[in-house]
Amino acid sequence: MTSLVVFGAGGRAGRRITAGARERGLRVTPVVRDPARHTDVESAVAGDVTDADSVAAVAAGHDVAVSAIYTADVDPTKLYGDGTRALLDGLARAGVGRLLVVGVASTLEGPDGVKIYDSADFPDAYRPFSLGRAAEVAELERGPVDWVLFTPTMQLVDEPGTGSYAITADGRIVDGITTYADLAVAMLDEAVSPKHHRAQLTVRSQTAF
């Protein structure tokens, strides 16, 4: 049986992934920074992705790690750059060889081959967050753990799942909508039956709304 440790289990993506894993009968450990703030997340444990020792402690004994971390009160470069380096270090120490990550569409390329966050019309207010996520990709690429980055479309919505999804692996933005539910299904399918390695994928829900 595949066992998962889910970092960021208190967020919308993390909750969906955790619930979906349990529905499949998988062993899952949800990790949040402060369990007292997430009393509705069953069996949540405390963990900090920016601390390799903390990561190693909570990840030990699991087959696959999931990173669905997001917070508005930590500098994005620290959280996604330094944090990803610490996360990878901790996972390697714990012997966890696979990491599945919830990505963000602005790190993909547009039709002109330019990263979305570098396009002329990209809002300045969102650029620091996107640069933090770009630093995350760079850390994944040079890190020691096999990873897959699951990137939703620009329209990521908290709607019921459509029941199916499409994946592209060319690093380009795609039109359409992605639901958190379908994103979770795609990631859990990969956790149970690995098909991709050290790759950034785009996930789109198959059915339009």
Image (tube, helix red, strand yellow):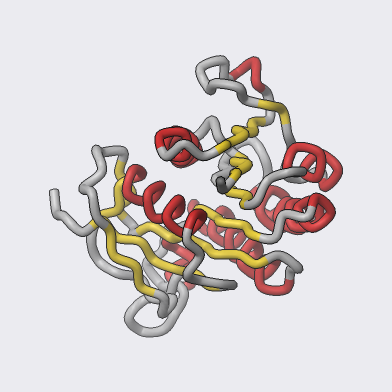
Q: Residue at x 54, y 59 (%)?
A: 130
For this rendering, which residue is in front, 101 or 129? 101
Tell me where residue 116 appears, x and y as whole percent. Answer: 43, 69
For this rendering, which residue is in front, 58 or 115? 58
Q: Quadrant of residue 123?
A: bottom left
Q: Residue at x 54, y 30 (%)?
A: 10
Q: Residue at x 75, y 53 (%)?
A: 91
Q: Is residue 121 visible?
A: yes
- Against 195, residue 72 (above or below) is above
Taking the view exactly as shown, the residue that stands out farthest to the left is 209
Taking the view exactly as shown, the residue that stands out farthest to the front is 1
- In the figure, is residue 88 to the left or right of 193? right
For the image, the number of numbered tags is: 0
- In the figure, is residue 77 to the left or right of 162? right
Tell me where residue 68 appears, x and y as whole percent. Answer: 54, 45
Q: Quadrant of residue 48?
A: top right
Tell me where residue 43 appears, x and y as whole percent. Answer: 60, 22
Q: Residue at x 50, y 34 (%)?
A: 11
- In the figure, is residue 97 to the left or right of 102? right
Tell me where residue 3 appears, x and y as whole percent. Answer: 60, 44
For this rendering, which residue is in front, 157 or 90? 90
- Against 144, residue 132 (above or below) is above
Q: Is residue 124 visible?
A: no
